[in-house]
Image (spheres, grey):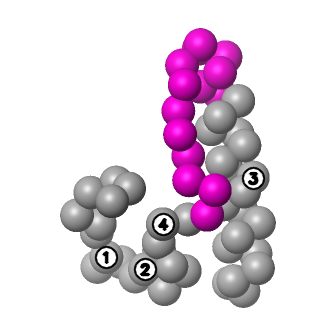
Amino acid sequence: MPPELFEKAWQQARRAAEKTFALHREAVRVPEHSPYSLKQVLDPDFFPDSAFD
């Protein structure tokens, strides 16, 4: 997957998550850019220690 496509997918998912939470009147902070690299996301052995350090 090209890095540009990963960034585009992140932005689309970010907007979708914010809209979904807004429907339930919940505020959520989704980072503007993925806190993980494409390499990390594609690595089946990668597991972050905590969500958004």
Tag 4: residue type?
Answer: Pro
Whether residue 43 is visible to the viewer of this picture, yes or no, is yes
Q: Under tag 2, what secondary structure?
A: helix
For the point 53% across and 33% down, which residue is it?
Answer: 28
Q: Earlier in the sequence, mark 3 or mark 4?
A: 3
Whether residue 42 is visible to the viewer of this picture, yes or no, is no
Measured Cα–Cα span from mark 1 to mark 3:
23 Å
Measured Cα–Cα span from mark 1 to mark 4:
13 Å
Q: Earlier in the sequence, mark 1 or mark 3?
A: 3
Is the residue under label 4 in contact with that under label 2 (CB below 8 Å)?
Answer: no
Vertical placement of 9 versus 15: above or below?
below
For the point 65% across and 34% down, which residue is it?
Answer: 18
Tag 3: residue type?
Answer: Gln
The stretch in magenta equals 20-33
For the point 22% across and 64% down, which residue is it?
Answer: 49
Q: Kindly identify which numbered label has been placed on residue 12.
A: 3
9 relative position to 38: left or right: right
**Residue position marked by numbered label 4 in the rendering:** 35
- For label 2, the crowd category at 10 Å Cα-Cα, with few meaning under 14, some 14 to 19 and many 20 or more, is few
Q: Where, by quadrant of the figure, is residue 3 drawn?
A: bottom right
Tag 2: residue type?
Answer: Gln
**Residue position marked by numbered label 2 in the rendering:** 40
Q: Where, by quadrant of the figure, is residue 43 drawn?
A: bottom left
Q: Earlier in the sequence, mark 1 or mark 2?
A: 2
**Position in image of residue 22 (x %, y %):** 65, 21
Is the residue under label 2 in contact with that under label 1 (CB below 8 Å)?
Answer: yes
- For label 3, the crowd category at 10 Å Cα-Cα, with few meaning under 14, some 14 to 19 and many 20 or more, is few
**Position in image of residue 4 (x %, y %):** 76, 79
Majority secondary structure in the magenta region = loop
Q: Earlier in the sequence, mark 1 or mark 4?
A: 4
